[in-house]
Every structure is written in C-alpha cells, then in structure tokens.
Image (cartoon, coloured by chain):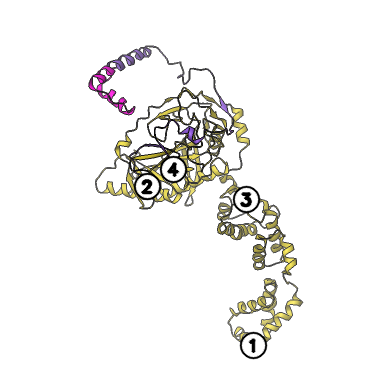
C-alpha cells in the first residue's frame, strides 16, 4: 500500500525585543541565573502584567510577511498547568482571537511550487529553564532559572499541508529566513531561539481522512527536523503495514541516538483550561497601525530572490545563495551598483567572500573588505587590468589592509601585461627553449598548450593577460 | 448539570489538591449548585451579544520596550524555601530529559 505523509508544524520564535513581554526585565540571553527577574515574571501575587508594544508590532510584521489576516481585536488567555519553570502556574498565551490568522507561505520543493497555509500566529511568554543534568544538581532536586520566564515568543501554526520531511525542512528554512529578514528573531535552533514541533500522521494515498498523529518534540536543528520526521514516518509505516495502530502520543527526538522516545503518559494528561486573562485588556489593531508597520518592512526573501533573477539576470542558484541573509544580499547589491557584470560580482561573493566569512567565522557586517573596495577589485578584473588569478592574491592582501585594489596593484606592479610586443619576446623565448614540446604539439598533442601557457605565466609572474597569451601563442605555434 | 465525583477528582488532580471522601462529596454538591446557578444564564437569548472577553471597556494598554532594573538575585530568591547556587531548588521533576 502506498502512504501519504501529513505534517503540520508548530514553530516557536523568540522575539528580539530588549525586554520581556509583560515586564521590563531584560530578555537578553546568557545572564547569570535569576538576575533577570522581577515580581511580575516571578509570579508574585498582586502584580499586573503590562504588554510590550514591540511584541505586538513584531507579531503583526510576521503576520504581514506570511499573508495573514491581522485581527482587529486580539485577546490574551491563561493556559493552566503546573511546572516548576512556570512560577505563576499558567502561561499567558493567546487562544481565541489570536493576533494573526489564515496566512500562507509559498515555497519551492524539488522544483515544485507548494503553498503551506498558516492557521495562526499568536503571542505568548516563554517559560524558565529547569536544570536536571549538571553535576551540582542533587539526585532529588531540580534547579530553576527564571531569566527566560516572560521572554516574548510568537507561535506559528501551520495547517497539515506539508507532505514530506524535505518539504518541512524547506518550509522551516523559508520561515527562518523571513524572521531574520524582518530582524525579529535570530533563528538559532541550536540555542533554542527557534523551536519546532511536528504533528505527523500517515494515511493511505487518496484518503482524505487524517490518520492518528504523533507529536514530535525536541528537534533542535534543521537537519534534526528532517531526520526526525523521516524516522517517524518510517516508524508509523512499519506499524500500519504490520497490522498495528499508531497511538496518539508525544515523542521526544533524541538527536544523538537518532530515534524517538515517548514522553511518559502521566505528563500527557493535559487539560489547559484556557480562559481570557483578566489582567490584560484586549489589543485593538487599527488599519493605520498595520500600514505603518507594513511601510517599515524590508523586501522579503522570496521577492528578493525573484528580483535578483530578473534585474541582475542571475541563475536561480546564485539568487538563492546571495539572498540567504539580508546582509549578504545588501552587500551584493552595494557591489553590483558599481559593476555591469552582476554574474562576475556574484561569483566573487559566492566564492572568495563567503568562503572567507566561513573560514574566519565572520558576519558580513564585520567583513574587512567593504562593498566599495570589492567593487574596485572586480572593476580591475572587468577592465582586464589584472587577471582573475592575480585578483585572488590582491583579495587576500585586501583582507589585512585598508588599501584599495588599485593601490595594491600599483604598489606591487601587478598590472596585467596585455601589450603584445612585450609578450612576444617572452613567448618566443619559451618556444625556443622547448623544441621537443613544439614538435609534439605539431604532431597533434594539442593539450601541450597548457604547458606553454603555464611557462609563460611563470616567466611573467602571472601578470600576462591569458587571452592575449593564448592568441599570440597559437599564432606562433601554428606558424612553426 | 450534575457534577460527579470523578469530575471533582479530575479538577482536584489538575489543581494538585487531595481530598478525602467526605470532602469530595461536599465539593461535588457545592460545585453542582454553582454550575446550576450559572445555567440560569442559558435561559437568556444571547444571539446578538458578543462574547465578553474583558469587563473593562478599555484596550491597548501597552508600554515601550525599555529595560528597567530587575531584582538582585538574592532578593529574587528570598522567598524560596530552598535555593542553591543562585537557582531555585525544587523537588525533582520526573522527566525524560
């Protein structure tokens, strides 16, 4: 029997605000334990949460970027459960009337366009951190750090529209890219600022009824999400093909052992008893506010990819690589503004620039060669002042210098020799010095051209213009 | 609506409370009468009434995203029956982590 996979994702994104969602404690990561705490996020009696306006703006931004309808009225609810990292005994979230609904994200998976619908995006607070594993934790205790309590999150929920682990991966990547373009979440899954849970079921192909789903948690990398879903689909397929039934349960992905573990059923007895939080008044979003937020949004990744293909005539691959982050895309455009040959600029950024960033673990914002200087270098190549090969050594020089490419070329005398009278002599010498090779060439061993060019380049310290060399060399050899 | 013993036990469990048999019976009766009292509301026609999510007629009370000082760690922990190395210490949570 052939099965169809049905996947829905729930994504939590930590927002890059300065303060928590309902109090003025800093929400920055990495502070000493329990030093970002106040009576509100500690859940003291009698305190009142006050909503951070930026959280609403960020949620609306994400809603607009994913084609959602922004609710004109939105309310907060209490989600009740007990866990030590949740001091109040409830999480403030949204249940009825979330801030955004009915969105979609278009992606391309293995050449096929796919539309993934979003059920909703809502605002909520994060919980604290429980420490179980450190050596200083006694066997009968759990330690709690409340710094993360109240860190603002948006939860993005998809419809069960995803049909393969690959599709989940591509969708998640697109979503992360949008979050990062909007500069509202850093998208770091390993550090937990982006988290993804998946609801997975399978059904016989052609069925419209959903199968029993399992909820998969704890996938803390992009690769992990794809691997975990692949594993779970196989597990469910095995169960069904051997006559069994999939149980509705929550599973934890173990990235090291590459398998899933069920969460004990006792912890599963969830009954959150949501109700509107009387401490928080409704949020009304006026159309003017939405338009002001929209006006402040950057061009989004999909639009930018498309523009890079049309405006700069770049191949799809180049457009995707260059628009991966907004900063690299901005860098490319800043260089391309000075150079006619966008593909040449693209090659340099995808090659030398990204390789260097990768090797030196740098962000492009800290890259020592600014767009203007790189444009200066590419310009010299385009004008045949230096060869691509020489350009690479100039590039290396520029990494540790503030000089322009032109200054380095001048100082080191690297200007390409294109003057045929100058090259004539060099080529004649090489030909005279290698009579054997000339004979073999004439006998049909044409690949020896490479040998001659190599010798000429060596004699000119790489400065000979390869085009002119090739042309002159062929003329001379053929005359022999 | 009649509240059953198992309803009371379920709510008690969710609230992490324990009751003996007599208490459960007493709570069952009290909760039944509270629910019945609210059921009176069902007699009203509310077709044209929007659900009330808040009793106050105000909206949009928001603050700017500006950091203010948090409590010092020792004050934050001062109500904790047990703390250790700057953390709250609580009885072990059963978990698969």
Q: Which SS class for mark 2?
A: strand
To which residue does mark 2 refer? A253
Task: Measure the alpha-carbon separation of dots 2 and 3.
Answer: 35 Å
Quote the CA–CA distance across marks 3 and 4.
28 Å
Q: Residue placed at 48% from the left, 42% from the top? A: A115
Disc 1 versus disc 3: nearer the observer: 3
Mark 4 = which residue? A196
Whether residues under marks 3 and 4 lie with C-beta atoms below 8 angstroms apart, the answer is no
Is B9 part of what is drawn in magenta?
yes
Magenta region, residue range: B1-28
**Marked residue nearer the N-terminal end (2 or 3):** 2
Q: Is residue A291 above or below residue A176?
A: above
The tint of chain B in the picture is: purple
Numbered disc 2: what chain?
A: A
Mark 3, mark 4: which one is toward the viewer? 3
Between residue B45 and residue A351, name the one nearer to us.
A351
Q: Residues within 10 Å of mark 3 (few under 14, many from 20)?
A: few
Which element is circle 3 on? helix
Q: Quadrant of residue B90?
A: top left
Crowd band around label 2 with a 10 angstrom C-alpha radius: few (<14), some (14–19), many (20+): many
- First of labels 1, 4 by sequence position: 4
**Badge nearest the viewer, 1 or 4:** 4
Name the residue located 29 percent from the left edge and 41 percent from the top edge.
A247
Q: Nearer the viewer, residue A244 or A252?
A: A252
Residue A145: quadrant of the picture: top left
Labels 1, 4: one chain: yes
Image mark for residue A401: none
* Chain A shade in the render: yellow
Residue at which label 3 appears? A365
> Which numbered marker is on residue A435?
1
| The quadrant where residue B29 appears | top left
């Amino acid at each position: 029997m052939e099965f169809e996979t049905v996947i829905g994702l729930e994504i939590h994104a930590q927002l890059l605000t300065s303060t928590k969602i309902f109090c003025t404690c800093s929400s920055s990561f990495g502070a000493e334990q329990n030093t970002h705490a106040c009576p509100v996020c500690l859940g003291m009696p009698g305190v009142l949460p006050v909503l951070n306006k930026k959280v609403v703006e960020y949620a609306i931004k994400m809603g607009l970027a994913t084609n959602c309808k922004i609710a004109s009225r939105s309310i907060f609810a209490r989600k009740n459960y007990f866990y030590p990292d949740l001091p109040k005994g409830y999480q403030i979230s949204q249940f009825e009337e979330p801030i955004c609904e009915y969105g979609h994200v278009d992606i391309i998976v293995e050449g096929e366009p796919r539309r993934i619908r979003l059920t909703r995006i809502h605002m909520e607070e994060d919980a604290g951190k429980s420490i179980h594993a450190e050596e200083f934790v006694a066997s009968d205790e759990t330690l709690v750090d409340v710094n993360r309590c109240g860190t603002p999150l948006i939860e993005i929920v998809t419809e069960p529209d995803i049909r393969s682990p690959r599709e989940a991966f591509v969708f998640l990547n697109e979503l992360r890219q949008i979050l990062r373009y909007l500069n509202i979440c850093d998208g770091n899954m390993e550090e937990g600022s982006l988290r993804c849970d998946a609801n997975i079921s399978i059904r016989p192909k052609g069925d419209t009824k959903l199968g029993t789903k399992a909820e998969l948690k704890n996938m803390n990398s992009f690769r992990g999400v794809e691997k975990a879903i692949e594993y779970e689909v196989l597990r469910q397929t095995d169960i069904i093909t051997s006559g069994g039934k999939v149980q509705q349960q929550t599973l934890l992905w173990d990235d090291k052992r590459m398998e899933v573990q069920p969460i004990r059923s006792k912890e599963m007895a969830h009954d959150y008893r949501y109700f509107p939080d009387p401490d928080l008044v409704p949020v009304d979003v006026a159309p003017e506010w939405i338009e002001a937020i929209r006006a402040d949004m950057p061009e989004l990744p999909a639009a930018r990819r498309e523009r890079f293909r049309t405006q700069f005539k770049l191949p799809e691959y180049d457009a995707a690589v260059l628009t991966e982050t907004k900063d690299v895309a901005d860098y490319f455009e800043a260089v391309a503004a000075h150079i006619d040959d966008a593909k040449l600029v693209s090659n340099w950024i995808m090659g030398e620039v990204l390789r260097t960033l990768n090797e030196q673990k740098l962000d492009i914002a800290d890259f020592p060669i600014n767009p203007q200087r790189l444009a200066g270098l590419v310009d010299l190549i385009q004008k045949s002042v230096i060869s691509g090969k020489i350009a690479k050594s100039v590039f290396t020089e520029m990494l540790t210098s503030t000089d322009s490419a032109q200054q380095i070329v001048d100082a080191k005398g690297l200007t390409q020799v294109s003057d045929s009278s100058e090259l004539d002599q060099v080529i004649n010498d090489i030909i005279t010095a290698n009579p054997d090779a000339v004979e073999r060439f004439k006998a049909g061993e044409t690949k020896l051209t490479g040998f001659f060019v190599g010798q000429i380049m060596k004699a000119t310290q790489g400065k000979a213009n390869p085009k002119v060399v090739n042309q002159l060399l062929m003329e001379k050899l053929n005359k022999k | 609506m009649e509240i059953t013993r198992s309803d009371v036990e379920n709510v008690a469990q969710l609230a992490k409370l324990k009751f003996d048999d007599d208490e459960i019976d007493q709570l069952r009766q009290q909760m039944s009468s509270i629910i019945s009292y609210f059921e009176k509301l069902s007699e009203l026609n509310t077709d044209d009434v929007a659900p009330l999510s808040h009793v106050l007629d105000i909206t949009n009370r928001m603050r700017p995203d500006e950091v203010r000082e948090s409590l010092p760690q020792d004050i934050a922990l001062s109500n904790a029956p047990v703390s250790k190395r700057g953390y709250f210490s609580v009885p072990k949570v059963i978990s698969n982590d």
